[in-house]
Image (cartoon, helix red, strand yellow):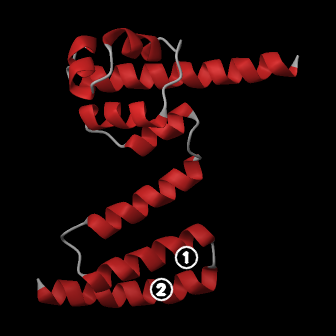
């Protein structure tokens, strides 16, 4: 009986992945055939993924994500390859690190603030919050 539950869960996650991919493809205004060409994944295989029949590899998901211009991590989470907590934290930290509008000091402080809030260390969060306020004041004075 446990086997049936596991199979049902895997089937549900594949279905959710397929629905998500279909939604993303439609938002990008691409046909299945166009996405197949852009991602270099066969049309029948993409169709099977969207219908929840096939479980794609991380490499195939990366190709699809690149073609759709979405985060590969979001597809990994939907496919059950990556844990939500792991992915979410990494995406936030990457976004901070890659924002060209931030100075190095601002990046460092934002990362510290984010990590302190996620870690739920209230004393560290308060100290970092004060430092963040200083950085914001400096940025406003520079602008």
Residue 129 placement: quadrant: bottom left
Q: Rounded to the nearest whole Å, what is the CA distance between mark 1 and mark 2?
A: 8 Å
Q: Is residue 2 above or below residue 67?
A: above
**Element carrying mark 2:** helix
Q: Say if mark 1 contacts mark 2, CB within 8 Å.
A: yes
Residue linked to disc 1: 116
Q: In front here: 49 or 128?
A: 49
- Reply above or below: 83 against 91: above
Secondary-structure class at tag 1: helix
Q: Which class describes the residues within 10 Å of circle 1: few (<14), some (14-19), or many (20+)?
A: some
Left or right of residue 68: residue 81: right
Which image quadrant: the N terminus? top right
Q: Position of residue 72 (x, y in %)?
A: 39, 41
Which residue is at the far right? 1
- N-terminal of the two: label 1 or label 2? 1
List the residue tagged with mark 2: 128
On the question of residue 28 being in view, the answer is no
Residue drawn where x is 54% and y is 81% of the image: 125
């Amino acid at each position: 009986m446990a086997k049936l539950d596991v199979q049902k869960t895997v089937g549900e996650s594949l279905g959710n992945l397929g629905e998500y991919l279909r939604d993303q493809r439609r938002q990008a205004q691409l046909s299945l055939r166009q996405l197949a060409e852009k991602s270099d994944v066969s049309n029948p295989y993409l169709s099977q993924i969207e219908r929840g029949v096939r479980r794609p590899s991380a490499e195939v998901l990366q190709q699809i994500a690149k073609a759709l211009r979405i985060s590969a991590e979001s597809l990994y989470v939907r496919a059950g390859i990556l844990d939500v907590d792991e992915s979410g934290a990494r995406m936030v930290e990457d976004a901070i690190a890659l924002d060209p509008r931030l100075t190095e000091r601002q990046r460092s402080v934002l990362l510290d603030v984010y990590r302190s809030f996620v870690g739920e260390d209230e004393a560290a969060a308060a100290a970092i919050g004060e430092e963040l306020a200083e950085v914001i004041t400096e940025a406003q004075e520079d602008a």
